[in-house]
Image (spheres, rainbow, N blue to C red):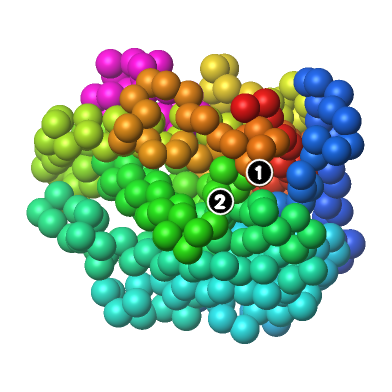
Amino acid sequence: MAAAAAAAAAAAAAPAPAAAAAASLLPLALIAVPPPVQLPAAAVTARFKVYSWNILAQCLVRRELFPYATDKATLAQRSRLDLIMSVLASDPPDLFLLQEGRRGHDTCGMDVTFTRRDEGTIKPAGHGIVIAWNKRVFAKVAQRNVVFDNHPLTHPTSITPLTGNVGQIAALRFIHAPYSGVVVSNHHLYWRPTAVFEKLRQAYVMVNEIDAVYQLLKEQQVDTTAWPVVFGGDFNTTPSDPLYNLLSSKAGDLTPSQLSALLTCYTPDPATSPSTAPASTVASYVERIDSLTRDFASVNANYRKLDQAHEPPPPPKGGASSESPDPTTNEPFFTNYSVWKGTLDYVFTGRWPSNVAELGDEEPALPVQGKGGCDVRVRAVVQIPPWSALEPGIPNRVWPSDHLIVGGIVEVVQSES
């Protein structure tokens, strides 16, 4: 939603087509991902469906941000809430990460943890982020909330404004495989496109907090070597941004221009020169994130290869803007389809390294009850609707948010020790 703000004013003057007639809810479909190696059934420890979705908080809905929404019902709270509930009930996953949600959302009988945005740091808002899980699949073991503006690593400074952003982490044990589980992280990073350093710093805090949860589990005598991580949310980061490259590859693959871009801080006054963060600080953040996310992969890392019908949106008109497709990635062309069109939402999965400080460049030994460690494999991904079904933009009569759902089906499999 936030990325649309910069272009919405110009687009408001563009003629909008007549409101579409009422239609059915956009269906959720999955695209199967063939496994690289056929595994015996006994090798699969767990299998679960995970979705992430920014549902668009009603308090952030303003007609000037969605000038194409000429049908009043499209943005009305009652009709949007009904659609959101229909989406949540249409295909409930085992694990749902929601951004811009609110306390009390009906999540189809799932257990939930809610972290409210702001927490008093700026004007309070009723929305926040939600982790919801199927209580027949998972049982919560631990939880941690992160309020970035109150965190010692991201508190407001001369180069870091108040953001109101929050994160949350839940350690969930598989009920049917009690020696295994998943550490789930959900967040909503700062929305301003020029706040590259601020988003890096927020990601740095989140991975450190995830590591703290793993340490807490170990203190509770939980063997976490069969506990992969799910790191999802609204990153407000495109596939061409350096933060995405850092999370999806290795720090050594970042180009000098990408490393330089990570120094860029948000500047409230566009007439002034952009502020920059200390290079040594950025280098330490990059090194730490790289060491903790070395096994991360985006669920949608190969999406364009899997969905040959997926196409970029048509060239923007009337002052709208779109993210130029990045030829170096195979992420979807869009997960946000409003005045601005592009990809901002991800679910990363992977193993979490043990005792990172002592490992250096060595691979961690991951014994799990004498059966080896764990790997994470994506078996299906949520299909992105064709752009023709979303024109001229969402929300509309068939989809209640400006963001689409991302995620898929993930397997935790035993790996050789």
The kind of secondary structure element at disc 2 is loop
Residue 248 falls within the magenta-colored stretch? yes
Residue ID at (66%, 33%): 372
Part of the protein shown in magenta = 244-261
Name the side, left or right, on which 168 lies relative to 355. Answer: right
- Is residue 325 or residue 229 the one in the foreground? 229
Picture coordinates of residue 13 (x, y %)?
A: 51, 52
Residue 56 can be seen in this image: no
Residue ID at (40%, 16%): 253
- Is residue 19 or residue 115 the one in the foreground? 115
Q: Which residue is mark 2?
A: 223
What amino acid type is highlighted by mark number 1? Gln
Name the side, left or right, on which 91 lies relative to 356. Answer: right
Residue 387, relative to residue 325: is it above or below? Answer: below
Residue ID at (17%, 37%): 281
Mark 1 neighbour class, 10 Å CA radius: few under 14, some 14 to 19, many 20 or more = few
Q: Could you tell me how far apart the alpha carbons at marks 2 and 1 are, in whole angstroms?
A: 9 Å
Where, by quadrant of the figure, is residue 311 drawn?
Answer: top right
Q: Quadrant of the C terminus?
A: top right
Residue 90 can be seen in this image: yes
Name the side, left or right, on which 285 lies relative to 380. Answer: left
Q: Disc 2 or disc 1, which is closer to the eye?
A: 1
Name the side, left or right, on which 201 lies relative to 361. Answer: left
Q: Which residue is mark 1?
A: 369
Mark 2 neighbour class, 10 Å CA radius: few under 14, some 14 to 19, many 20 or more = some
